[in-house]
Image (cartoon, rainbow, N blue to C red):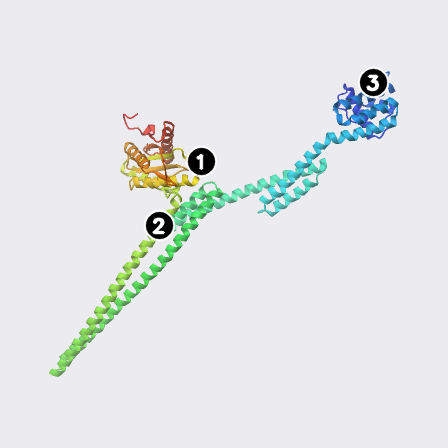
């Protein structure tokens, strides 16, 4: 059967001669002129062979092949020279031997690189399936086992049919993984919705959930956004810290409550004793009155009077004793009540910790949202101005690079400390980014807000930040915006943020006002 010749350049005698020699070697045919002529015609067709073709033509082609090998394959120069010598001597057996050796040398030279590359790619796919995919599917044993079986199939695929089977298995695996991922996402979303419903309704089930509100807010914030491992770990860490501290406070609260209950019980008991003693005294008085009315003897009257006086003194003594004990119980009850209020306040304070940035002790995003909503509602209710300022520390990256991240963190702590000292009690500072802060200024128009932030800038330049006893100047650029009617928190912050970038670009350590917030006549 004729072999395909589509890839050969039939107009190139060298390629035709090389293919002729390859077929002679593959079919184990002696390289005689007649055999060479037959295969040559098989490749190019009888019409393409000159009529005078014969052994001389075959010999000349073999000579041309030897020359071509010498020029283009220097490593085969010795074999080409041996072929040329055998051709000149007419030793066709030696020609056959040399052609066979040349074919063997050419075959690995052309295919070894491809085989090595395919083997490497197959091995990489096997490792990816075994150590990348299978381990990620450990929670689904069936898919993990299917992945391992596919890896074994790929490893053993040494033929086209084997590779096709592996490709089919790989396609089937991706379909199963995609379906499984879809199911996992649906389960996750369903669990998030259930948890969110639970969190939202817990507060409604409690009469006073102030101490619990912080934890609920943290959980709600986490589950309403995309589930990122860093956010989950941070929420877990902060909740554990707050829960531990609250457990200590709640233990004291339980003890104080038990003390108050015991005090109230004792108080009621004392009241009951006092009432009972009073009843006994009244009965004794009635008995003495009855005896007095029935006797006429002066001595008997004297004895009755003495007994009456003794009973009265005893009753007075019991009454004073009960009164003193009741006062003690009352004081103890008041102390227990005060202690309970103190512990409840501490519980609320512990809960508020989850509203703070743990490093700077300014408000975090949760705390900012709460305070903004409260102040915006108050401003609308009483029709008062309400402004904010967005601050960004100047050259903070350079500070970090030059002095280290620990110094950078301490600089931010210093900024918040100075801000709390300089701002009013009604103002709030929150951290909204790495070195970016937001200050809430209730009942403040934009002009007054600019004065407040400028005063803070001046105070920060006077109260130096010290790094290893070296003064370091910390400055910030700020943008101020006054809230418009019904303006959302995001829109107001965006306007103030734009003004802050304007301050950055105009020289830093400046305060700029959002364009829509400029008072009449201002530029």
Q: Could you tell me residue 445's position as x and y percent?
A: 28, 33
The mark closer to the camera, 2 or 1, is 1
Q: Earlier in the sequence, mark 1 or mark 3?
A: 3
Count of marks, rendered view: 3
Residue position for label 3: 49
Q: Are marks 3 and 2 in contact (CB under 8 Å)?
A: no
Q: Which residue is mark 2?
A: 348
Callout 3 secondary element: loop
Q: State whether residue 209 appears in this view.
A: no
Report helix, strand or loop for mark 2: helix
- Determine crowd level at label 2: few under 14, some 14-19, many 20+ residues with C-alpha closer than 10 A: some
Would you say 348 lies left or right of 153 here? Answer: left
- Give the spatial CA distance, label 3 vs label 2: 103 Å
- Residue at 32%, 56% in the rendered image: 340
Give coordinates of residue 470: x percent, y percent.
Answer: 37, 38
Q: Quadrant of residue 33?
A: top right
Q: Which residue is mark 1?
A: 401
* Residue 126 in picture, x, y percent from top left: 65, 40
User: How far from the left and from the top, in percent, is residue 76?
Assistant: 77, 27
Q: Earlier in the sequence, mark 3 or mark 2?
A: 3
Q: Nearer the viewer, residue 283 or 478?
A: 478
Q: Give residue 511's quadrant in the image.
A: top left
Q: Quadrant of the C terminus?
A: top left
Which of the 4 image quarters holds residue 17?
top right
């Amino acid at each position: 059967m004729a072999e395909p010749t589509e890839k050969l350049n039939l107009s190139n005698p060298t390629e035709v001669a090389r293919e002729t020699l390859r077929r002679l070697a593959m079919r184990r045919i002696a390289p005689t002129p007649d055999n060479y002529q037959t295969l040559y015609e098989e490749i190019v067709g009888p019409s393409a062979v000159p009529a005078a073709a014969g052994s001389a033509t075959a010999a000349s082609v073999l000579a041309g092949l030897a020359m071509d090998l010498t020029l283009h394959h220097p490593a085969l120069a010795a074999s080409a020279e041996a072929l040329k010598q055998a051709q000149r001597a007419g030793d066709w057996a030696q020609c056959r031997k040399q052609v066979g050796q040349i074919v063997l040398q050419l075959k690995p030279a052309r295919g070894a690189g491809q085989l090595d590359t395919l083997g490497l790619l197959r091995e990489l796919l096997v490792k990816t399936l075994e150590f990348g995919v299978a381990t990620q599917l450990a929670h689904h044993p069936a898919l993990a086992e299917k992945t391992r079986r596919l890896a074994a199939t790929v490893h053993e695929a040494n033929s086209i049919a084997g590779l096709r089977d592996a490709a089919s298995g790989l396609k089937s695996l991706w379909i199963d993984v995609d379906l499984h991922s879809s199911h996992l996402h649906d389960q996750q979303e369903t669990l998030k919705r259930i948890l969110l419903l639970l969190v939202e309704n817990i507060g409604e089930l409690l009469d006073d959930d102030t101490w619990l509100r912080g934890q609920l807010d943290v959980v709600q914030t986490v589950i309403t956004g995309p589930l990122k491992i860093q956010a989950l770990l941070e929420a877990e860490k902060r909740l554990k810290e707050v829960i531990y501290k609250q457990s200590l406070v709640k233990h004291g609260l339980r003890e104080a409550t038990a003390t108050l209950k015991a005090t109230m019980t004792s108080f009621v008991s004392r009241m009951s004793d006092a009432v009972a003693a009073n009843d006994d005294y009244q009965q004794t008085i009635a008995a003495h009155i009855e005896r007095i009315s029935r006797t006429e003897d002066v001595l008997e009257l004297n004895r009755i009077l003495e007994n009456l006086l003794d009973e009265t003194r005893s009753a007075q003594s019991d009454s004073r004793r009960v009164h003193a004990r009741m006062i003690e119980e009352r004081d103890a009850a008041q102390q227990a009540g005060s202690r309970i209020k103190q512990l409840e306040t501490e519980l609320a304070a512990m809960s508020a910790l989850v509203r703070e940035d743990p490093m700077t002790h300014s408000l975090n995003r949760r705390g900012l949202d709460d305070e903004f909503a409260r102040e915006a509602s108050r401003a609308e209710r009483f029709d008062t101005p309400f402004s904010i300022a967005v601050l960004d520390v100047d050259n903070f990256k350079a500070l970090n690079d030059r002095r280290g991240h620990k110094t950078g963190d301490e600089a931010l702590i210093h900024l918040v400390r100075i801000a709390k000292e300089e701002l009013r009690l009604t103002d709030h500072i929150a951290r909204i980014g790495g070195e970016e802060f937001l200050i809430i200024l209730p009942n403040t128009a934009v002009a007054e807000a600019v004065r407040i932030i400028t005063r803070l800038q001046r105070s920060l330049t006077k109260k130096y930040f010290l790094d290893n006893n070296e003064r370091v100047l910390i400055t910030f650029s700020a943008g101020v915006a006054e809230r418009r009617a019904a303006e959302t928190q995001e829109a107001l912050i965006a306007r103030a943020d734009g003004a802050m970038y304007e301050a950055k670009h105009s020289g830093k350590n400046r305060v700029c006002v959002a364009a829509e917030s400029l008072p009449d006549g201002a530029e």
